[in-house]
């Protein structure tokens, strides 16, 4: 008899506990469980419109947008080293790779009126510097390198709207990466050297910051197998 009584009490306690737990779950306002049917299909994600608008197809080639210009114009650049200007529905190629006019990736002036680039921009070719006026849509060769010295423009950057910083150096061989630093004035047409390095050194890059242009100079060892890099702030005035 006692055993039956104990079993009955245990059963009552068990049922009461389950009921209380059920009540707590129902009364909790912070917990919401939503189950979707197993056959629910999630919608396919659409491509990002901002990414899609940066790629242009022209004559079966892909171009990536670099700059958005005033008057609904854009500058694009391709892996084949071709610069393209899009003006409304008009497409203009700034260089022709079929006659070795490979172009470097263009750089935009601060006022967005001009772009500068090097062409031809290819191994062991003498690269000159061009400026393209985005308003008149005309291109002009502003720096003709010395072919007799086998020079080539390596890097071009805008110092301001009227002046370019250009690295010009030996354009032949596999070792030479840079050269000396020059300043070109678009208004006067003057080209002058503002930083020359010794035989074991090369200027390889330019970064124009708020304090002025900073150049990267590499120094080779005697075997030209290794080099060290240092950064130098340049005064252009």
Image (cartoon, grey):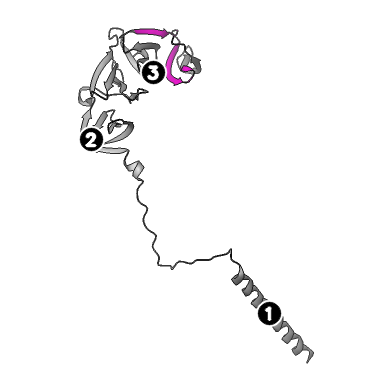
Q: Give the residue at mark 1.
A: 16
> Which residue is located at x 65 percent, y 73 percent?
21
Alpha carbons under labels 1 and 3: distance apart: 83 Å
Q: Quadrant of residue 3?
A: bottom right
Question: Mark 3 or mark 2: which comes first in sequence?
Answer: 2
Locate residue 192 relative to residue 125 in the image: left or right: right
**Residue 171 seen:** no
**Residue 155 colored in magenta in the image:** no
Disc 1 or disc 3, which is closer to the eye?
3
Query: In the figure, 9 relative to 198: above or below?
Result: below
**Residue 20 seen:** yes
Q: Give the residue at mark 2.
A: 88
Q: Position of residue 226 (x, y in %)?
A: 48, 18
**Of the pair 6 and 110, the residue shown nearer to us:** 110
> Which residue is located at x 68 percent, y 79 percent?
16
Q: Position of residue 216 (x, y in %)?
A: 46, 18
Alpha carbons under labels 2 and 1: distance apart: 77 Å
Within 10 Å of disc 3 (Cα), the crowding (few <14, some 14-19, many 20+) is few
Query: In the figure, 12 relative to 189: above or below?
Result: below
Locate residue 33 relative to residue 72 in the image: left or right: right
> Which residue is located at x 33 percent, y 15 percent?
153
């Amino acid at each position: 008899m006692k055993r039956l009584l104990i079993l009955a009490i245990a059963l009552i306690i068990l049922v009461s506990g389950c009921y209380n737990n059920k009540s707590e779950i129902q009364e909790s306002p912070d917990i919401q469980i939503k189950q979707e049917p197993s056959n629910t299909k999630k919608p396919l994600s659409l491509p990002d419109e901002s990414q899609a608008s940066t790629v242009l197809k022209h004559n079966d080639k892909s171009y990536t947008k670099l700059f958005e210009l005033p008057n609904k114009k854009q500058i694009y650049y391709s892996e084949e080293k071709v610069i393209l200007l899009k003006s409304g529905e008009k497409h203009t190629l700034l260089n022709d790779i079929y006659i070795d006019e490979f172009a470097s990736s263009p750089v935009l002036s601060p006022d967005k009126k001009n772009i500068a680039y090097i062409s031809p921009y290819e191994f062991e070719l003498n690269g000159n510097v061009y400026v393209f006026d985005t308003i008149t849509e005309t291109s002009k060769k502003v720096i003709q390198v010395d072919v007799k010295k086998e020079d080539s423009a390596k890097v071009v950057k805008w110092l301001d709207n009227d002046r370019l910083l250009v690295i010009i150096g030996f354009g032949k061989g596999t070792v030479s990466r840079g050269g000396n630093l020059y300043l070109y004035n678009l208004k006067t047409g003057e080209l002058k050297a503002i930083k020359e390095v010794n035989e074991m050194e090369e200027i390889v890059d330019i970064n124009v910051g708020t304090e002025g242009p900073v150049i990267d100079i590499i120094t080779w060892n005697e075997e030209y197998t290794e080099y060290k890099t240092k950064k130098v702030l340049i005064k252009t005035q």
